[in-house]
Image: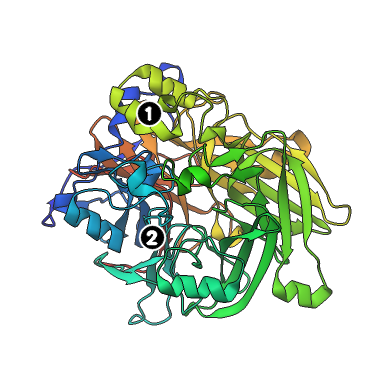
Amino acid sequence: MASRSCRGISRARPRSRTNTRAFDWCRTSYGAGYADVNESACPLEVTVNAPNLPEDLVGTYFRNGPGLFTRGGNTTNHPFDGDGFITRITLPGDGTLSFRGDFVKTDAYVEEKRANRRLYRNSFGTQRDGGPLANAFDVTQKNIANTNVLVWPTQTQQDDETPKLLALWEAAQPHRLNPTTLETEGVDYINGLLRPGAPFGTGIPDLDRTLSEAGVGVGGKVLAAHPHVDPRDGRLVCCGTLVVPKNGSLATEVTFYELDKNLKPIETSTESLDSFILLHDFAFTDEYYIVAQSPLELKSFPFVLGFKGPGEPECINFKSTGLTTLHLIPRPQAARRRSLQRTSVQVPSCFIFHFVNAHQKDDKVIIDVVQTKSFSAWHPDRSLEASFGGFHRGLASGTREFLDSYFDVGDTGRLVRYDVDVASNSANVISPLSDRTVEFPRLNDNQWSRSHRYAYVGASRHPTRAQPLQCWTKVDYSTVTTEGRVGEQVLYDAGEKGFVGEPTFVPRANTSGREDDGYLIGMVFNGETLETDFVVVDARGGREAIVVNIPDIRLPLPALHGTYTRRVFL
């Protein structure tokens, strides 16, 4: 698509409209958000006049998420199985906005596009064409590269030093893209730290390495979808898992990497944890890595026999009578400094996908998370047609009943805090901190692994009902110790027909040093125009949002995570 300039589409919108129509949301608009990106027009490109953008907001925002759900007439079993699509929003500081978007061209994506049919299996039940017989005994999964995006290093000292742009998915290795053109350059094994294959092994390192090199699809070393930067020293801290047999059951080996600006290891360490762990995100403090282990049981036979994907409820069983374990694993430098040991604290049964933050205070570790009561937020305990696995089939029916059923499971994300006393190996649970449905927590990255006051989340318009994310809400943790609740301020409400993605906090260029001195930026699906908006909100509150419409660009709703760099890529 040729680049073009458009006028008159940068506008201000009131920051909150939460009283309109009793917090209702438009089911038709929501359903319209799950359409494929126009693959034949890619790469998508447009330049927009946006004179209302803040003058000091200069840089590039990247976002990743599923962009293609249909291949050869067959739809993915769930949106999270869609092929990764990278968005680049460049803000050069001249009153314009430059948009570019393209698919992550993994080998599997290229092969399936050429064949115009599904050739690979996916985590959430999307199967290769041909039924169970065509899928049996093939444990290879498609690397969909659709979950997060990393720019590293985030800032470079020399103008001619180009950082890496990596597309992440936690069950495989990242793909490297050109940050200007978004052309896929190939799999990146992070200076040999990773290796091909899914994160399932034999428990025998040499054999796993051999299987990986043989290309049989297992024995791989992967990178989880949420790397974090340690603000103390600028290290990139990340991890990956490998599930192996142990004593007639399973264990999960979690390997942590602390990397320099060239993605070379400063520290590496591996911790073996009993049972299966579904690790999407993690946290750390000055002394500990923190991993949440929900009471999940992996049943591999339906997957191996070709009937189900490994992420479907028939393969992952949530044991509601079990307990969730928070593992505090010493970071290598802290263990050397004062001989720390792993602390594993059990808390009531829950499922944790995302951490808000964690920090230490004396002998306590304070952990803030978004959690659900069980895995049922992703796999409602209903018939398949009204469940995670039948999402697209239900959506295609266009019924209000399906969408209401999908959200009315009483188990959406809530903010929870754990105060862990390392000395007594116990935890005090403060739950819930809010009754609002939330997800995609972010904060000022300078506060990561440090005490924070504010976080920012995608949230429901209604303060208590389970609904889609339509607001960006500022969460104030300063009231937790006195009231057991967080303060809430809706910074942006997309309205009845708008649906927000993850908010990203960008510190103001000449910041005052206040934790909230900056902007929230991100993408919004406009269900009225069926186009995408780029939104900028003052994180301090009290000001109107700046909404820049990106004409003729229709991106799907289930976009996941993004990042921002002050580097300008055009």
Residue type at mark 1: give it.
Gly
Residue type at mark 2: give it.
Asp
The numbered disc on residue 367 is none
| Residue at 38 percent of width and 82 percent of height | 158
The numbered disc on residue 495 is 1
Left or right: where does residue 530 sit relative to residue 291?
A: left
Name the element at disc 1: loop
For marks 1 and 2, the one nearer the N-term is 2
State the residue in front, 58 or 349.
Answer: 349
Question: Callout 1: few (<14), some (14-19), or many (20+) C-alpha neighbours within 10 Å?
Answer: many
| Residue at 24 percent of width and 54 percent of height | 112
Question: Callout 2: few (<14), some (14-19), or many (20+) C-alpha neighbours within 10 Å?
Answer: few
Q: Position of residue 169 (x, y in %)?
A: 44, 57
Name the element at disc 2: loop
Q: Position of residue 115 (x, y in %)?
A: 18, 54
The numbered disc on residue 56 is 2
